[in-house]
Image (spheres, rainbow, N blue to C red):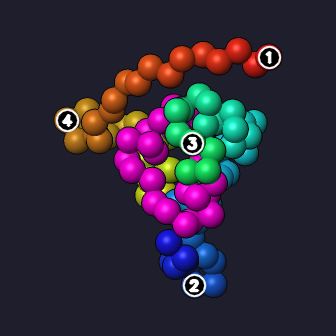
Amino acid sequence: MTEIMTSTPGVPAWTIADRLRKAREVSGLGQARLALVTGISRQTISNYERGATSPSKGNVKLIGLATGVDRYWLWDGTQVDPTTPSDQAKPSTIWFVPAVDAA
């Protein structure tokens, strides 16, 4: 996961590790809090964000729900166009993530 692909010459594209880290940071969650909310260990989240290991699609969904970031963007940098007819859109899954007391 150390490769960086370019979409425009001279401009590196974000890797999944970059997108996961940015989603967590923008949502205001630390790795420990994200681990608590998702049930994914803090070490595993750290490994994902460093690019040491690749997350499963299930864990990307959990992180997307916990951070409020589109899971498709997290996975591959794309998003479902809201104008796409529903029969052509990527399927969605609703997950329950329990609220965690911020104490």
Lower position in the chain sequence, tag 2 or tag 1: 2
- What is the x, y in percent for residue 38? 53, 32
Q: For numbered disc 4, what is the local secondary structure? A: loop
Foreground residue, 26 or 100?
Answer: 100
Mark 3 vs mark 2: give the one in front. Answer: 3
Q: Secondary structure at mark 2?
A: loop
Query: Where does label 1 land, which residue?
Result: 103
Q: Secondary structure at mark 3?
A: loop
Q: Which residues are magenta?
A: 45-69
Marks 1/3: CA distance?
20 Å
Q: Could you say which disc has been placed on residue 9 in the image? A: 2
Sequence-first tag of 4 and 1 = 4
The answer to if 56 sits in the magenta stretch is yes
* Real-space CA distance between mark 3 and mark 2, rounded to the nearest whole angstrom: 37 Å
Q: Are marks 1 and 3 in contact (CB under 8 Å)?
A: no
The answer to which of marks 1 and 3 sits earlier in the sequence is 3
What distance separates the C-alpha of mark 4 from that of mark 1? 43 Å
Q: Main secondary structure of the magenta part?
A: helix
Q: Which comes sooner in the sequence, label 3 or label 2?
A: 2
- Residue that extends furthest to the bottom in the rendered view of this protein: 9
Name the amino acid, label 4: Asp
